């Protein structure tokens, strides 16, 4: 097997593969064996008849088609592995020559682009001090109190009130819990501010040719997320678009700059994870997946409503993103 890789852009590679007579003979043999395993011949169990007998029973056209399929899939897979190509998509497939002695085919590959990463270890940002005042706790307790109003009557803020809200022994313990929750919320917002600053800084100093295909996929995900949010509120995407007087394509065009930024940041996070050898262990994904599945009453509902492999892949990516962002925050905070 011979092949040639020609890069058109940082994310586009044209692959031309040439298979000679020896290569094709190997794939023809594999095709005959594979098809023979599905033949039923009197006197033999399925797939157990000698190849000499099955050879005459096989449709040669089926053999050639099967061999062609095997040749392309296996040779393509070997090249991706050998060249360590990180594939996004493969398209524009064309068989340029197909004879008993030689087959030549070409594929246009969309790959994750190579780019020069900006310095991400010497960014500095000061973390704001986080504190929770008694006044903030008072406001939150009052909000909770109002949510428990019955027949226009507000409950008194006492130890008994605190006990009615959970595993609190008294009002003091409840207020400590409220304060802790407010502090955690502020810490998360501060981390988000820092991480956004760092990503913006890296992205602003990193030049990347963003594959349009990845931008289109991001736009598709953004529309899907919008549709899901609308459904949760009893609304329909079509009615929403009619209300704002826009088509889905017009909405995507408005969102395209944001989608390009999101893809660029995702590529940066991916590259940092690779450089820092960050991984997500299967147990981490399994634990988060099990937490999510507790929202469903039965396994039947899970099987009906959830694409488990897809969800696991999504969770893995989220966890990896969190690890990278936490790493960047730790490096940057002074």
Image: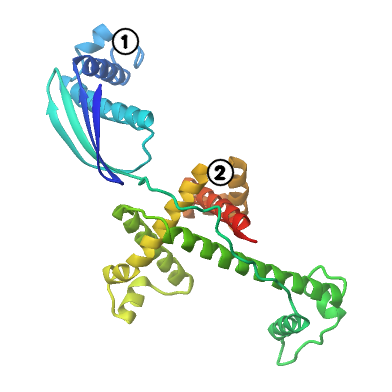
Q: How crowded is mark 1: few (under 14 residues within 10 Å), some or many (20 or more)?
A: some
Which element type, helix, strand or loop, lies under badge 2?
A: loop
The residue closer to the viewer here, 187 or 88, is 187
Q: Position of residue 146 (x, y in %)?
A: 70, 86
* Residue appearing at x 32%, y 58% in the figure: 216
Q: Residues within 10 Å of mark 2 (few under 14, many from 20)?
A: some
Q: Is residue 132 above or below residue 23?
A: below
Q: Quadrant of residue 245?
A: bottom left
Q: Is residue 35 above or below residue 201?
A: above
* Residue appearing at x 36%, y 53% in the figure: 208
Quarter holding the N terminus is top left
Which element type, helix, strand or loop, lies under badge 1?
A: loop
Residue at image mark 1: 49
Q: Relative to residue 184, is residue 112 drawn left or right?
A: left
Q: Where is residue 69 in the image (x, y as percent from the top left)?
A: 25, 29
Q: Position of residue 237 (x, y in %)?
A: 36, 71
In the image, farthest residue toward the bottom: 152
The residue closer to the viewer here, 54 or 243, is 243
Q: Relative to residue 175, is residue 302 drawn left or right?
A: left
Residue at image mark 2: 278
On the question of residue 114 being in view, the answer is yes
Q: Quadrant of residue 41?
A: top left
The residue closer to the viewer here, 280 or 239, is 280
Q: Do the residues labelled 2 and 1 touch (CB within 8 Å)?
A: no
Q: Distance from label 2 to label 1 (Cα)?
A: 51 Å
Q: Is residue 323 above or below residue 248?
A: above
Quarter holding the C terminus is bottom right
Q: Relative to residue 202, is residue 284 drawn left or right?
A: right
* Residue appearing at x 27%, y 68% in the figure: 249
């Amino acid at each position: 097997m011979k092949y040639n890789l020609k890069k058109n852009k940082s994310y586009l590679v044209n692959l031309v593969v040439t298979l000679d007579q020896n290569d094709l003979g190997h794939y023809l043999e594999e095709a005959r064996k594979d098809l023979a395993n599905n033949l039923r011949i009197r006197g033999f169990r399925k797939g157990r008849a000698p190849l000499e007998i099955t050879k005459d029973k096989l449709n040669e056209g089926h053999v050639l088609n099967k061999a062609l399929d095997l040749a392309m899939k296996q040779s393509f897979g070997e090249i991706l592995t050998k060249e360590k190509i990180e594939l996004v998509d493969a398209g524009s497939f064309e068989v340029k020559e197909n004879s008993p002695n030689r087959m030549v085919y070409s594929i246009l590959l969309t790959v994750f682009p190579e780019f020069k990463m900006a310095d991400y270890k010497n960014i500095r940002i000061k973390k704001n001090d986080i504190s929770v005042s008694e006044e903030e706790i008072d406001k939150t307790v009052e909000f909770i109190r109002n949510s428990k109003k019955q027949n226009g009557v507000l409950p008194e803020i006492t130890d008994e009130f605190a006990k009615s809200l959970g595993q609190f022994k008294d009002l003091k313990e409840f207020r400590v819990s409220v304060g802790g929750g407010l502090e955690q919320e502020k810490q998360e917002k501060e981390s988000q501010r820092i991480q956004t600053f760092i990503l913006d800084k890296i992205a602003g100093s990193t030049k990347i040719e963003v594959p349009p295909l990845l931008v289109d996929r991001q736009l598709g995900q953004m529309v899907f997320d919008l549709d899901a949010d609308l459904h949760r509120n009893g609304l329909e995407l079509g009615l929403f678009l009619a209300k704002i007087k826009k088509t889905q394509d017009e909405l995507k065009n408005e969102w395209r700059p944001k989608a390009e930024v999101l893809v660029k940041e995702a590529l940066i996070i991916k590259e940092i994870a690779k450089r820092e050898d960050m991984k997500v262990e299967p147990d981490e994904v399994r634990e988060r997946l099990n937490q999510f599945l507790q929202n469903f009453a039965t396994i039947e509902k899970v099987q009906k409503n959830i694409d488990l492999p897809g969800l696991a892949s999504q969770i893995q990516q989220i966890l990896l993103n969190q690890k990278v962002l936490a790493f960047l925050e730790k490096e940057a905070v002074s």
